[in-house]
Image (cartoon, rainbow, N blue to C red):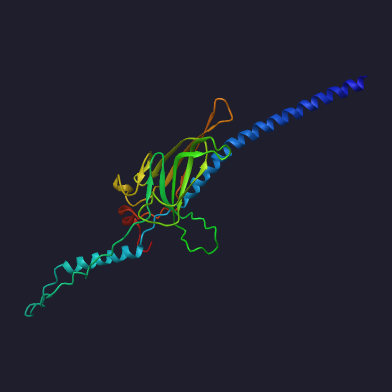
Amino acid sequence: MIAVVIMAFISIFTSRMIQQGVQAKTKIQSEIDRTSGLKAGLALITQDLQVSFNYHDVNAELYNAAQTARQAQSATPKTPPPPGTSPPPPPTTTDPDKFKLKIINTFTRFFGEVDKLNFTSLNNFRSVKNLQESDQVEIGYYLDTCTSRLKKSESSKCLWRRVSPYIDDEVKEGGTASPILENVKSLHFRYLGYGHEEEWLDRWVTEQGEEVMKGRFPNAVEITLTIYDKRTEPPKDIAMTVVAAVRFPNNRPTEAASATTPPGR
């Protein structure tokens, strides 16, 4: 009888431990399921931003700088001839194309708003081997309504990713958009860059706004994404914030930096 009682206590204790372990595993797995999609969405945005790239034609810029220097040199008064000699005759005609500058077209842009983002990146994924496409790609992120994958009768606000492998004047349009995350409550961006190294901005546009932004990509982007878990009652909000550092924005050097850079660097 004593042995039976001891075995009964051991069995009860073991069954309770197993039950508690299963409940803990279910709870942990549920938490992982809630945040896995959120983490994956933030990781994709971070990866795109890390390799965002501001291309500019260095050869055309060097040519225009040389042409400007030649024009300034030609406009400088010549040294007067020695006494007793006649000055050289002035040029009879002037070639209008002699110091003509090349037109530089800018296609890489960064349009960063508080709740949407469009920019050019080097994160072009080619699913076909040897496909004749560049690494450059237009990418956009924004919120819009989409249908649920599991229940077609339901819809929610979703995080959309727009991709265009062709760089053109309309960086904010074109390409193919796909929803990558459902049940999104809010999306918020903030930007850090030249001239604003110590303060986060809600807007960064390379063609408008402050002079320090024109033609320059930001150095870092803060992304805050909030989703709601519909499996709880009431739905539970889950938010995460990450900072994506732009690894090589390829911005033009500032005048101050150029003046302090030693020759040959």
Q: Residue at coordinates 23% horizontally, 67% vertically from top-left?
A: 100
* Closer to the camera in the image, 152 or 203: 152
Can you name the residue that lies furthest to the left here? 84
**1 lies left or right of 257:** right
Indicate whether 160 appears above or below 64: above
Indicate whether 203 appears above or below 87: above
> Residue 255: horizontal and vertical position, in percent?
30, 54
Can you name the residue that lies furthest to the bottom here? 85
Q: Residue at coordinates 27% horizontally, 66% vertically from top-left?
A: 66
Where does the N terminus fall, quadrant-wise? top right
Q: Residue at coordinates 39% horizontally, 43% vertically from top-left?
A: 192
> Residue 119: horizontal and vertical position, in percent?
41, 50
**143 lies left or right of 3:** left
* Closer to the camera in the image, 106 or 92: 106
**Figure quadrant of residue 33:** top right
Can you name the residue that lies furthest to the front here? 153
Indicate whether 19 appears above or below 254: above
* Closer to the camera in the image, 64 or 149: 149
> Residue 241: horizontal and vertical position, in percent?
49, 38
Where does the C terminus fall, quadrant-wise? bottom left
Q: Residue at coordinates 36% horizontally, 59% vertically from top-left?
A: 56
**237 lies left or right of 211:** right
Q: How many marks?
A: 0
> Residue 246: horizontal and vertical position, in percent?
44, 49
